[in-house]
Amino acid sequence: MRAVTWQDRRKVSVDNVADPILEQPTDAIVKITSTNICGSDLHLYEVLGAFMDPGDILGHEPMGIVEEVGSGVTNLKAGDRVVIPFQIACGHCYMCDQTLYTQCETTQVREQGSGAALFGYSKLYGQVPGGQAEYLRVPHADLTHVKVPEGPPDDRFVYLSDVLPTAWQAVAYAGVPAGGTLVVLGLGPIGDMATRIAQHLPDIGRVIGVDLVPERLDRVRSRGVEVVDLGDHGDDLADVLREMTGGRGPDSVVDAVGMEAHGSPGASMIQRMAAHLPDAVTQPLLKTAGVDRLAAVHSAIDIVRRGGTISLSGVYGGMADPMPMMTLFDKQIQLRMGQANVKKWVDDILPLLGDDDPLGVDTFATHRIPLEEAPHAYEIFQKKADGAVKIVLKP
Ligand SMILES: NC(=O)c1ccc[n+]([C@@H]2O[C@H](COP(=O)([O-])OP(=O)(O)OC[C@H]3O[C@@H](n4cnc5c(N)ncnc54)[C@H](O)[C@@H]3O)[C@@H](O)[C@H]2O)c1
Ligand SMILES: [Zn+2]
Ligand SMILES: [Zn+2]
């Protein structure tokens, strides 16, 4: 089959690889019909390359049609239309029982000290072949799928793999009080969708989005969300947001930026250096040093009102990142974070994926590109060129 593989820093290719086969009775094979590129893939493309091997298949936002199931799979059959969550979970361990699927004790990658295995997400998460391919092997398929109805186009459902539950969890973890204000930092797919969900929820009073890419600001503004351009307010963002919120600051802030934030020159240099060292040097460095660009999380700490909540959905990876503990403590800030527990939120989200399309998923993708053109797709997404916000690859 054809698959998108990681080759080197900023280099992916589309190659012939072996078709996946059933390896365990609990596996299913899915023929992929749509498969997205995610901001998280950009971390592999750039900073986390030391944890990738050339040839690793990328991708964790696929959907398609079940081709074949193992003898132990009880609730799926060939022909079912499914979205595959980005994490692999067993559905019957202590963590899964608490809907903490990203912490599944059956699939945890213990040798790396990581949580549940993820599709296409480096040795840190089990080096499981990903979903930017014609076919995907889905382990623990009984739990690791979302069945979706026939009829509407793939765009309607494909974001259930990651964007929708991640944005939903980001807003839920932000704990906005009734009538309160939420600021969303970063208006990539995750932040954009978080503003849509927050706007839709009746209890949230006001939503403000922040980014520096003009098309991303426009997209969010066009749906009636207030936006602040970081390009105009690089130095006084927190002051501006406090002014907009009665001098106090917003009740809650979502960080939908992550470790490659704009405006962290020191860490940005470390990330670039790390990319040129041998993996044996870089892996422990990435795991022990402060390598994240922390501009966004630091501004979230500054922006949020005293006693407010910060919800981190952007991915961070360093182990010794300097954090302003005094400010966190003094302002009595609550901090919640983590990979989204996809299946936990599906029942909340599915009713919003009807023909009235309140979240605008049908038109969410800016690009639909053949899988064969993945190298070009990665390049424009990373450079934020050609208006790329969300790219769906078509095998
Ligand atoms: N928690 C999860 O389960 C989960 C799932 C998916 C993605 N993510 C993470 O969420 C983050 C966002 O993902 P995405 O797909 O939207 O990626 P993205 O890279 O397209 O979006 C990030 C946006 O942040 C903006 N930005 C950069 N620096 C900023 C700053 N200092 N202040 C405000 N905005 C800034 C960028 O211009 C960009 O538009 C990534 O870190 C990704 O890894 C987490
Ligand atoms: Zn993703
Ligand atoms: Zn489990």
Image (cartoon, rainbow, N blue to C red):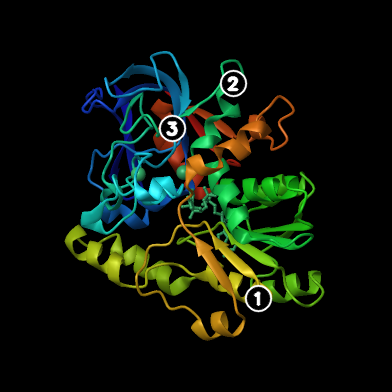
Q: Counting other residues with Cα less than 10 Å from the Cα at mark 1, is it few (<14), some (14-19), or many (20 or more)?
A: some
Depth check: give the residue in front, 140 or 297.
140
Between disc 2 and disc 3, whose residue precedes? 3
For label 1, the residue is 307
Instruction: Please state if 345 lies on the left or on the right of 104 as rendered.
Output: right
Name the residue beneath numbered marker 2. 153
Classify 10 Å Cα crowding around label 2: few (below 14), some (14-19), many (20 and above): few
Task: Relative to 351, say whether 118 is above or below.
Answer: below
> Which amino acid type corresponds to the residue marked 3 in the rendered image?
Ile
The residue lying at 50 percent from left, 49 percent from top is 383
Nearer-N-terminus badge (2/1): 2
Q: Secondary structure at mark 3?
A: loop
Q: Give, as a three-letter code, the residue at label 2.
A: Pro
Query: Is residue 277 left or right of 78 when viewed as pictured?
Result: left
Secondary structure, mark 1, is loop
Of residue 81 and residue 231, the one placed in the foreground of this image is: 81
Q: Position of residue 281 (x, y in %)?
A: 20, 65
Q: What count of labels does the image hold? A: 3
Q: Quadrant of residue 86?
A: top left
Query: Where does label 3 land, which residue?
Result: 84
